[in-house]
Image (cartoon, rainbow, N blue to C red):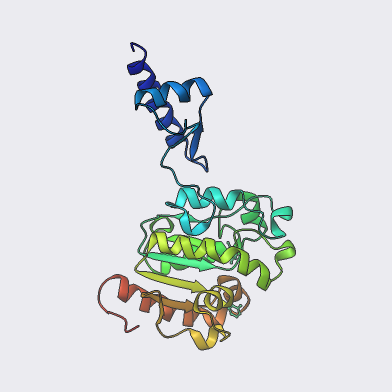
Amino acid sequence: MAIQEPLKTILAETRSLVERAGGARRSLTLSPEVAEALSALDGPRSQTPTKMETGTPPISSPDSAPSLEALESLVCACTRCGLAATRNRTVFGVGSPSADLVFVGEAPGEDEDRQGVPFVGRAGQLLTDIIVKGMGMRREDVYICNVLKCRPPLNRDPNPEEVHCCEPFLLRQLDLMHPKVICALGRHAAQTLLRTGESTGRLRGRWHNYHDIPFRVTYHPAYLLRQPSEKRKTWEDVKAIMKVLNGEVVPEI
Ligand code: URA
Ligand code: URA
């Protein structure tokens, strides 16, 4: 039939358009006429197909997100916990996806919730100083994210249900990036990722193993703003991280 080649081309193009559009659509719905014409191309079939697989798996869980972009789309649409109702913006992460160093904080605050970017308020300014002045790097050279992707109202502590709902996004985020070092900022990030109840003070000052990635704990910048005398200890933590990033030391984890 003369129609066969154009039909094949149109179907192939449509399939590739759907694939490139991404999202959760996995099949094309065909009209009965097209389905019949298609099955005629391949010879008789026991059943006329009205769906055509496009090869793009449905992305419904964080674990199956193939990229940071796909994961971020899931976060933007997330309604797993009550914070979805009170947030202005989700705050996924910022910086280089191929960074050697990833900082993990607690949760967005007011400025972050407004801008959709982590660590842009006062604590964020201190974190930037730690990166730039303390480590001699640029903020764009590292990656920064939080345990929670949405702001808890009035900046209260994340509750266990919120951490439970949001944690799979962070775990997948770290899995996709696989940095050389992870630095937890404060108690929530440290306790969530290391699955411990120990305090920041007890966890800092030594190396931990997070899925075979060297993992360091230091004080949260918001805590350092309240307790400036503790900055000295964060400075020590940062120096230890730099030695590993520079290849001077291989941490025993
Ligand atoms: N504190 C955090 O833990 N994360 C932010 O993004 C801002 C402040
Ligand atoms: N408590 C926290 O939650 N974080 C710190 O960094 C220090 C004390």
Residue name at image x 27 percent, y 79 percent = 250
Residue name at image x 40 percent, y 74 percent = 211
Quarter of the picture for ligand 2? bottom right
Residue 4 relative to residue 95: left or right: left
Q: Position of residue 41 (x, y in %)?
A: 35, 23
Residue name at image x 39 percent, y 60 percent = 177
Residue name at image x 37 percent, y 65 percent = 179
Front residue of 43/100: it is 43
Q: Position of residue 62 (x, y in %)?
A: 51, 57
Locate residue 165: give its quadrant.
Answer: bottom right
Locate residue 141: give its quadrant.
Answer: bottom left
Front residue of 54/137: it is 54
Above-or-below relation of 49 to 123: above
Q: Position of residue 99 (x, y in %)?
A: 37, 60
Residue 96 relative to residue 155: left or right: left
Which quarter of the rendering shows the N terminus?
A: top left
Q: Position of residue 164 (x, y in %)?
A: 61, 69
Front residue of 192/142: it is 192
Which quarter of the rendering shows the C terminus?
A: bottom left
Residue 158 seen in render: no
Above-or-below relation of 250 to 14: below
Residue 92 relative to residue 113: left or right: left
| Residue, far top | 2
| Residue, far left | 248
Front residue of 206/67: it is 67
Above-or-below relation of 83 to 43: below
Count of numbered badges drawn on the protein: 0
